[in-house]
Amino acid sequence: MSKPYGMDRADIGDLSEVMALLDERTRWLRERGHDQWNTGRDPKAYIINAIGRRNTWLLRDNGTSLATLTLTSQGDPDFWTLEELRQPALYLGKMASTVRRSGEGLGSLMLAWAQDLAARTGFDYLRWDVWRTNKQLQDYYRSLGGRYIRTVPAAHRWSGALFHIPARRIAGLSDHVITCSGISAHEPSRSFISSLER
């Protein structure tokens, strides 16, 4: 283990690493009786599309992938109101860390990194939706400062417990994780937003 870790935008050559992290976490959830990500839908097409749009990231330790997340400036209209969708927010999804490094605070670190990135690139909020039946995960996000907004029981959707956190710079973050590629420290928000919407 060596810090700071590196955060890189994933490219199509990283697809197997991203999928391995998501598949490992899905198995872990299933073993604990959670139905999250166990709907029978294959997320591979979603991830391929997200990588193509440059929305998926990998957290690495000396080249070894530890965790992944996907960020977009497009909120899900099944969950967020029109007023909320007009607000400048980054939306977080498909976040998973490797099980073998559980207890090291990787989820907290990635959330802090995304919160900092949102602030650096001109967004007001970092938002995400959580599986409605996974109360433990909802409590985990509350413990990290996530503000619960409401639960939306959208038809044919399993997620819908909505959270957000204000975008803000995180002091000392570079001691723990450095963005290695994909965005410079001073990239204008307009450029970053356009890269997310391609």
Image (cartoon, grey):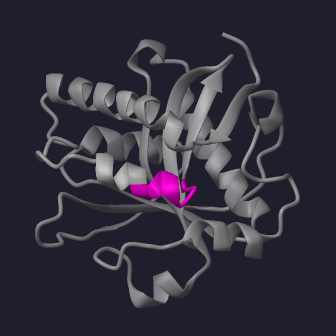
In the drawing, does residue 157 fall left or right of residue 149?
A: left
In terms of image quadrants, where is residue 177?
top right
In the drawing, does residue 74 fall left or right of residue 182?
A: left
Residue in view at x 21 percent, y 43 percent: 36
Estimate the x, y position of residue 116 in percent, counting from the top left. Answer: 72, 52
Estimate the x, y position of residue 100 in percent, counting from the top left. Answer: 42, 12
| Viewer-closest of 132 and 95 | 95
| Viewer-closest of 91 and 132 | 91
Estimate the x, y position of residue 139 in percent, counting from the top left. Answer: 36, 43
Residue furthest to the right: 186
Please state the extent of the stretch shown in magenta in the rendering.
49-55
Check the image and report above or below for 55 versus 57. below
Residue in view at x 56 percent, y 72 percent: 197
60 in magenta: no
Q: Is residue 124 visible?
A: no
In terms of image quadrants, where is residue 155?
bottom left
Residue in view at x 31 percent, y 52 percent: 45
State the quadrant of the N terminus: top right
